[in-house]
Amino acid sequence: MPDPVWSQRRLLEQYFAQSIRTFPDDPIVISEGDSWFSFPVHANTIDHLDELVKHRISLLRLEESGDTLFRMTAGSQRSKLRHLLTIYDVDALLFSGGGNDAVGPELLDLFDIVPPGESWQDFIIQDAMERQFRLIADAYHSLAHLRDVYRPDCWIVTHGYDYVKPSGKPTTFWLWPIPLSVVAGPWVKSNLEARGILGASQAQVVGYLIDRLNETLAEVAAEHERFVAIDNRGLLKANEWSDELHPTRAGFKKIARSFLDVLQEELPDKF
């Protein structure tokens, strides 16, 4: 019996190919990423982007909530992306990856337990921290190399996220047509607490990690042509967070706008 997920993705690619044939002047875009591109509770970045361009776009969506940068740039997912870049004249690859790799469970490996009253900065496992962000950089360099080989004119547009909020607030959504209520998260606060990082130090640690991620992406982008890393730090207001890791509907629209601004600047004839 066919895998329903595989069958659905196969159907989406068929729609994508048909859109390219029917609307040859529309930009051809692939989106790959994590829950900032596929948040199931309300409209997310790519949903809003599609609306902002009035659906005048041939768009293939590969993103999946909870996906990591390392999974997306290796193995079968890398092979799939290679295949798509080979057969389609893709104008832009939109990418959202690294958040789960920086402020997710991996942070448990980056800090020793911080005793009460001590500074968290003194308990960074420096070798592990440097290795983690080096791996993030290497994954993005690998993505750029894949693009360079198979579709060199394609733009890569990614982002470094805003400062997520370690509130401990999960999110709840419904799976249809079951229906089934699903609670996801929290993703950040519990891991910080497991390392003895409490109170105001939690926001400081998250700020440090998001800063490192944005700086890493900026360094990668500087080494590659047609590669833009959007810096959205400070973009979202306090009331524009749906839970500790994801923006509200209005917040996601701001993120989508930042992607569209780049696309309109770099591909003015398409957008």
Image (cartoon, rainbow, N blue to C red):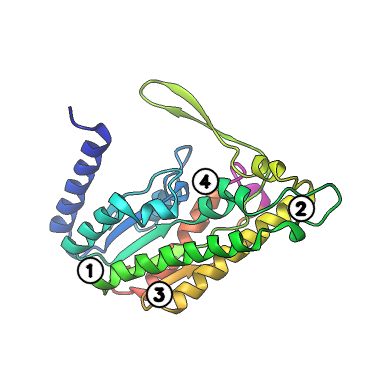
Cβ atoms under marks 3 and 4 closer than 8 Å: no
- For marks 1 and 2, the one nearer the N-term is 1
Q: Can you say whether 61 is above or below 138 in the image?
A: above
Residue 195 image offset from top left, x and y in percent? 71, 45
**Looking at numbered disc 4 in the image, what kind of residue is underneath it?**
Arg
- For marks 1 and 3, the one nearer the N-term is 1
Q: Secondary structure at mark 1?
A: helix
Residue 249: mark: 4
Crowding at label 2, few (<14), some or many (≥20) Cα neighbours within 10 Å?
some
Residue at the far left: name it.
Answer: 21
**Looking at numbered disc 2 in the image, what kind of residue is underneath it?**
Ser
Q: For residue 254: magenta? A: no
- For marks 2 and 3, the one nearer the N-term is 2
Q: Secondary structure at mark 3?
A: helix
Q: What is the CA distance from the residue labelled 1 to the residue labelled 4?
A: 35 Å
Residue 13 image offset from top left, x and y in percent? 20, 48
Left or right, 144 with respect to 108, comes to left
The residue that label 2 is drawn on is 201
Crowding at label 3, few (<14), some or many (≥20) Cα neighbours within 10 Å?
few
**Looking at numbered disc 1 in the image, what kind of residue is underneath it?**
Tyr
Residue sitting at x 60%, y 50%: 109
When asked about the image quadrant of residue 270, the answer is: bottom left
Residue 150: mark: 1
**Predominant secondary structure in magenta?**
loop
Cβ atoms under marks 1 and 3 closer than 8 Å: no
The magenta-colored residue range is: 238-249
Left or right, 93 with respect to 237, comes to left
When asked about the image quadrant of residue 7, the answer is: top left
Q: For residue 242: magenta? A: yes
Q: What is the CA distance from the residue labelled 1 to the residue labelled 3?
A: 23 Å
Q: Can you say whether 208 is above or below 64 in the image?
A: below
Residue at the far right: name it.
Answer: 117
